Amino acid sequence: MTAEKAHDPGVEAAARRAAPLHPVAEPIQVGGGGEVRVGTASWTDPTMIAAGVFYPPEANSAEERLRYYAGQFPLVEVDASYYAIPAAETAKLWVERTPAHFRFDIKAHALMTGQPSEVKRLPKAIREALPEELAAKTRIYGKDLPGEAGKLGAVFLQFPRWVFPSHESRRLILDARRRLEVEVAAEFRHHSWFNEKNAERTLRFLEENQVPYVMVDGPQGLKSSIPPLAAVTSPELAVIRFHGRRADLWEKPNVPVVERFRYLYDEDELADWVPRIREAARKTKQTHVLMNNCFGNYGTTNARELSALLKEQL
């Protein structure tokens, strides 16, 4: 089997790998440390909800799918909030459909991380509060804006690859935390944050402000590549996100987003992270591990495998 095929064997092969593994729906307690939750970066991706991929036939509605998912994992990431802010009623239903120990990590809206947003996608209350000259624009940035249930894990600030390390960028992180008034975690998408000049300064800034650094496993050798560095910068929370290692598609234009994450980790690749996750858990109260390789059942399979590896070594 070629290396490419080994990491993209199809949903049936991934299902066979997951079949003998039991769900780990409760947080994993690490001896001498805090709790570890493992989940995926989506529960509604079209390739994931397709018939026979992950959900059983009876889980055929939004409510039933979330209830089923929450019986398999104790954590999920809400990615849609990056593009459009969910309605309050929607978030209320999420809370009602999941157990008390379940957590939602929310990706911050693009406006909070230096990305522009279409004005028409903003909530009505925000659109109506915009000055006339801003309301007339097609897109605006966060800097243009005027000032302004227990299951929320953290809000992820995912900075695009054109946000470089600078005084302005660091202020952007602190300003986002001030505006959100919740726990935020920072993920970077440009290698210069961790080059020889800036790596120590980046981590020191996060530590001094107790902003969790989002550790990543992703493609290497690209401008947006961040090294798979294990670093804990907050005593409250550590976050690790697995993006897959599709370097051939990661920065390629006009590629469907799901294709960039179409990568099934093998057990050795997951096992390499187990001691790092356990070490992070010894330094924090909560450690969140999210599989963002959400093509079909790749993310759920790897989440089950990683949970099993963590429990084996308790």
Image (cartoon, rainbow, N blue to C red):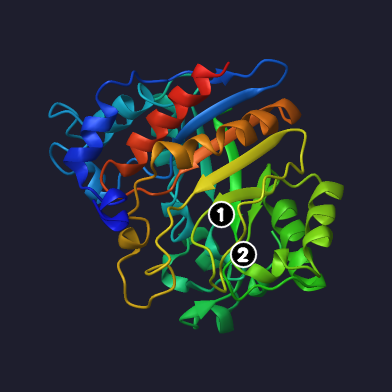
Q: Nearer the viewer, residue 78 or 12?
A: 12
Q: Is residue 32 left or right of residue 5?
A: right
Judge the density around disc 1: few (<14), some (14-19), many (≥20) Cα neighbours within 10 Å. Answer: many
Q: Position of residue 177 (x, y in %)?
A: 72, 52
The three-letter code of the residue at mark 1 reads Ala
User: In the rendered image of this protein, does residue 97 appear above or below residue 238?
Assistant: above
Mark number displayed over residue 108:
1
Q: Quadrant of residue 223?
A: bottom right
Q: Nearer the viewer, residue 258 or 119?
A: 258
Mark number displayed over residue 275:
none
Q: Quadrant of residue 142?
A: bottom right
Residue 157 visible at all: yes
Judge the density around disc 2: few (<14), some (14-19), many (≥20) Cα neighbours within 10 Å. Answer: many
User: In the rendered image of this protein, does residue 269 appear above or below residue 188?
Assistant: above
Mark number displayed over residue 113:
2
The three-letter code of the residue at mark 2 reads Thr
Q: Position of residue 161 (x, y in %)?
A: 58, 72
Quadrant occupied by the C terminus: top right
Q: CA distance from mark 2 to mark 1?
A: 8 Å
Q: Is residue 217 left or right of residue 291?
A: right
Q: Position of residue 16 (x, y in %)?
A: 21, 31
Furthest residue to the front? Answer: 1
- SS of the residue at dot 1? loop
Which residue occupies 68% across, 33% down? Answer: 280
Which residue occupies 67% across, 45% down? Answer: 230
Which residue occupies 67% across, 15% down? Answer: 31
- SS of the residue at dot 2? helix
User: In the rendered image of this protein, does residue 139 appear above or below residue 249?
Assistant: below
- Is label 2 in contact with label 1 (beta carbons under 8 Å)? yes
Residue 97 visible at all: no
Q: Position of residue 217 (x, y in %)?
A: 53, 51
